[in-house]
Image (spheres, rainbow, N blue to C red):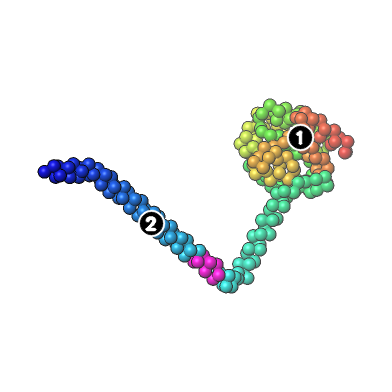
Amino acid sequence: MAVTVEKKKMDTESRPLRRSARVKAGAETADLKAKETNVVNRAEKSKKIDKLAARSEAKEDTNKNEPPVKKTKVEADVSKDRTENAQSTTQKQSKELEIGDDIPDVSIADQNGEIISLKKVLNEAKGPVVIFAYPKASTPGCTRQACGFRDNYDQFTGCDALVFGLSADKESAQMNFKQKQSLPYSLLADTKFELIGPLGAKKTAAGGIIRSYWIFKNGKLVVKKVGVKPEESVEKALQFVKSSE
């Protein structure tokens, strides 16, 4: 009887140990399975990468072996024309007029919307042609500059000179400026910088105008002043016109 009781006592004490051993063994088994799974996943991923690499290499080899696609003569000519036109446009836009150059063959609307061909004006002019540029119509500095040419307009025309104002303002803004200040000459609305750019008065690639003036004579640029004060542009331009009679 005493032996039986002792045995039961030993069994009772050993149960936690056995349970702990089973838990530990189960954890080790789960950990081993997880490691095996990771190994399998890595192996499968490596196989997929190898397959993709093999496909890519095969595709490259195929492309290398294929003869290049030849353009038809028409397609080649069109492509060539586009390239030449793009290069020509870039050169025209980047070329800045220097002393002795002809004015660009551009036509710009005045305050009335009438298209003015500057090249035609220069070819028909009896005397010098003065073009002054201002940053923005109806602003203080530009008003002083425009009114300076207005107040001395009779002296310019007395020397057979023509005067034009130039800015990137719209036709309506130019008309308002002309009427408000009673300007006797035309104002050119060069909204696309077709003349301002080649004349070298475009401030940045985005736009803006540097106050300037130019004088053309016999169709050629003879005076170029980029970056002047409002009053200076009037005084210097008139001085040159008088001295060139």
Q: Secondary structure at mark 1?
A: loop
239 and 86: which is toward the camera: 86
Q: Residue furthest front?
A: 2
List x then y, in percent, for residue 169: 64, 37
Mark 1 burial class by Cα count in 10 Å: few <14, some 14-19, many 20+ = some
Q: Which mark is residue 227?
A: 1
Q: Looking at the magenta stretch, what is its main secondary structure?
A: helix
Q: Which mark is residue 97?
A: none
Q: Please indicate, yes or no, whether residue 110 appears anywhere in the rendered image.
A: no
Q: Are marks 2 and 1 in contact (CB under 8 Å)?
A: no
Q: What range of the chain is rendered magenta? A: 54-62
Question: Is residue 55 on the magenta stretch?
Answer: yes
Image quarter of residue 162: top right
Q: As drawn, is 53 to the left or to the right of 79?
A: left
Sooner in the amino-acid sequence: mark 2 or mark 1: 2
At a point 72% along the width and 48% down the height, the residue shown is 94
185 and 36: which is toward the camera: 36
